[in-house]
Each structure stands twice: as C-alpha cells, then as structure tokens.
Image (cartoon, grey):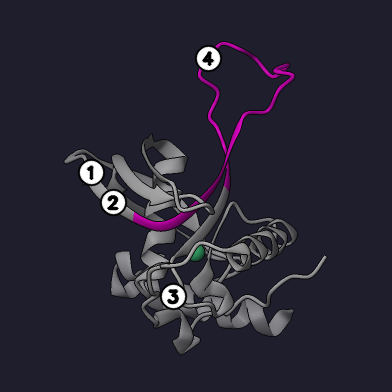
Amino acid sequence: MSKYRILIHPDKRLRQQAEDIKTFDNAIEKVVDKMFNTMYSAHGIGLAATQVNIHQRIVVMDVPRASEDETGGEDDAVELHDKLVLINPELVDYSAELAEYEEGCLSLPGQYASVIRPAEIRVKYRDVHGNEHDRDATGLLGVCIQHEIDHLNGILFIDHISRLKRERLEKKLEKYLKSK
Ligand SMILES: [Zn+2]
C-alpha cells in the first residue's frame, strides 16, 4: 500500500496554513486512505495533511481509549479506540480547566515534551462525505485533536513549551536524525 513521506521539523512547509476542503469527492477518500497507511506504518496515533505536504484541512487519527473501569485489570479482551477522519475541524468550545500531557509528533521523531492545553474541548468537523458532526473530547483524544488542528495552522507542539526546553529538544532531534 502506498504512503506519503512525512515532513520533519524544521521543514518550513510544516508552517504553512492549510485550506478548507470545499468539494467532497473520491479524491479525498484516496488521500485519507494513504494518510492512514502513512500514520500506521510510522506507529502514530494522529496525522494532519500538512505533515505530508498536502495543505488542506484533513486529519486522521486512531487513538486508544483509556479504560473506563480502573479496576478492570489487564484481561480486557477488546481494545477500545477512536478511529476518526476530521475534515475542516474547528474547536468550537474549550474548558478553562487545563491538563498536562506528554506529547510526541511524527514530524519530530523520538522527541517528547509535556504540553498544557484545555482539558476538554468540543470539535466541529465534516466527514469524508461532507456531513457535519460535533463531538466532545477529553483525555488523550482531546489532546490529539488539538495537536492535529494546530498542524493545520502551521503550529507544532514545541511552540507551546519554554524556549529553553524547545532548544534542548531541537538539539536532541538533530542528534536523533543523524543517528538514523
Ligand atoms: Zn504532530
């Protein structure tokens, strides 16, 4: 199955603003399929079109769902997850309450940092057929949605951390890429 090449920071194309999708046709489904292949083969949980040099507002994600039952143990037979395609996603609401999560990104391979964002969000988006949806999200799913919408606006998770931490992470990334 074919896949895209993922742009790696500090590629300037990661800073480009993506444009709204206006026509919902087969071409979008093809892009979405290829984006899922790209994401799965890189072991990611989310990918924005911007990261594969397509500057249209398309996001794919497949996020594991935290166990609702803390006492459930490790023998849960079914692994729950949210597989989503978000076209033209927009944050329409977010909580004042904040939460901190360790984030990573396929465009900064091997690098992680704690990022503080609203704990709860509401996203409005369209599916591949152009139908409108909205959804509330918290936890990892909420983080992932915010992270991916940022990509469409040319923003990376390292833009949310201190300059010192960012510079340290960028040096580590350089080393990491050279060692590959
Ligand atoms: Zn990312």
Locate residue 34 relative to residue 17 in the image: left or right: right
Q: Mark 4 or mark 2, which is nearer to you? A: 2
What amino acid type is highlighted by mark number 1? Tyr
> Residue at 50% of width from left, 19% of height from top?
68
What amino acid type is highlighted by mark number 2? Leu
Secondary element under disc 1, as helix, strand or loop, is: strand
Q: Nearer the viewer, residue 12 or 124?
A: 124
Q: Mark 3 or mark 1, which is nearer to you? A: 1
Residue 69 image label: 4
> Residue at 55% of width from left, 80% of height from top?
53
What amino acid type is highlighted by mark number 3? Arg
Residue 35 point in image, percent of width and height: 64, 63
For the question of whether residue 164 can be seen, the reply is yes
Residue 168 image label: 3
Of the image marks 3 and 4, the number of the one nearer the N terminus: 4
Secondary element under disc 3, as helix, strand or loop, is: helix
Residue 91 image label: 2
Q: Mark 1 points at which residue?
A: 94
Q: Nearer the viewer, residue 165 or 25?
A: 25
Residue 14 point in image, percent of width and height: 46, 80
What amino acid type is highlighted by mark number 4? Asp
**Mark 3 and mark 4: Cα distance apart in space:** 38 Å
Secondary element under disc 4, as helix, strand or loop, is: loop
Q: Mark 4 or mark 1, which is nearer to you? A: 1
Q: Do the residues labelled 2 and 1 touch (CB within 8 Å)?
A: yes
Quadrant housing residue 1 = bottom right
Mark 3 beta carbon near ligand 1 (under 8 Å):
no
Q: Dot 1: few (<14), some (14–19), or many (≥20) neighbours within 10 Å? A: some
